[in-house]
Structures are given as structure tokens and as C-alpha cells.
Amino acid sequence: MNAKGMEPKEMRAWRKGQKWTQSQMATMLEVSLRTILRWEKGDTIIPRTVGLHLAQWTEHKGLKEARVTRFVESGAW
């Protein structure tokens, strides 16, 4: 993500990395499928807040996965 926000290729790569469909991403971001299509094609600028939201999602998911991994590795389960 640059100073302007997320680039279309970055958004597409992020979505695919999460194994989400465009429809699932639209639901998560509370936008239309058409909006996701336009963002990924570069027809419409992706708002900076979307990139920030996805970054927070990634950070939260990573923290949650790290906690589960530590719990399993500790043998406490």
C-alpha cells in the first residue's frame, strides 16, 4: 500500500491469499460486488480506509492464529 492507498493488484492478491471470493470480500467490506470488481480492475480508486481495514483484519487474524499455535504447542489442550 502506498501513500494513495491500496493498488488493484494488491487487493486482488490479498483477497486470494485469504481464499475469499469477490462476493465474500464485498460482504465483509459491506460494499457491492460491482464495487469490488471495479476496484480490482482499477476502474475506481480504492479508498485508503479499505486498505487500512484489510491491514487490521490481517493483523487481528495473525494474532489470533499465533495464540492458537502457542496454546497447542504448550500442550495445554
Image (cartoon, rainbow, N blue to C red):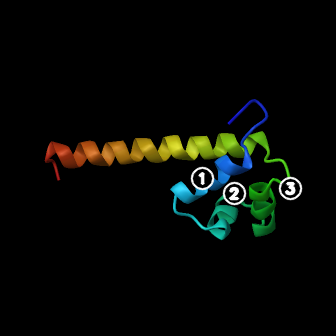
Mark 2 nearby-residue class (10 Å; few <14, some 14–19, many ≥20) = few
Mark found first going from the N terminus, 3 or 1 = 1
Which residue is disc 1 drawn over? Answer: 13
Q: Secondary structure at mark 2?
A: helix
Q: Position of residue 69 (x, y in %)?
A: 28, 46
Quadrant in which residue 3 is drawn = top right
- State which mark lies toward you, 2 or 1: 1
Disc 2, disc 1: CB below 8 Å?
no
- Number of residues whose C-alpha sits closer than 10 Å to that of mark 3, classed few (under 14), some (14–19) or many (20 or more): few
**For this view, does 63 lie left or right of residue 31?**
left
Can residue 31 be seen here? The reply is no
> Going 74% across and 57% down the picture, which residue do you hit?
40
Question: Which element carries disc 1, helix, strand or loop?
Answer: helix
Q: Residue at x 65, y 62 (%)?
A: 25
52 relative to 61 in the view: left or right:
right
Query: What percent of the width, then of the height, locates residue 68?
Result: 30, 48
Mark 1 residue crowding within 10 angstroms, few (<14) / some (14–19) / many (20+):
few
In this rendering, would 39 be left or right of 10?
right
Q: Which mark is residue 43?
A: 3
Which amino acid is tagged 2? Leu
Question: Residue 6 at x, y = what percent?
Answer: 71, 42
The N terminus, quarter of image:
top right
Residue 42 visible:
yes
Label 3's element? Answer: loop
Mark 2 or mark 3: name the one nearer the start of the chain. 2
The answer to whether residue 20 is above or below residue 75 is: below
Q: Looking at numbered disc 1 in the image, what kind of residue is underneath it?
A: Ala
Task: Name the residue beneath numbered marker 2.
Answer: 29
Q: What amino acid type is highlighted by mark number 3?
A: Asp
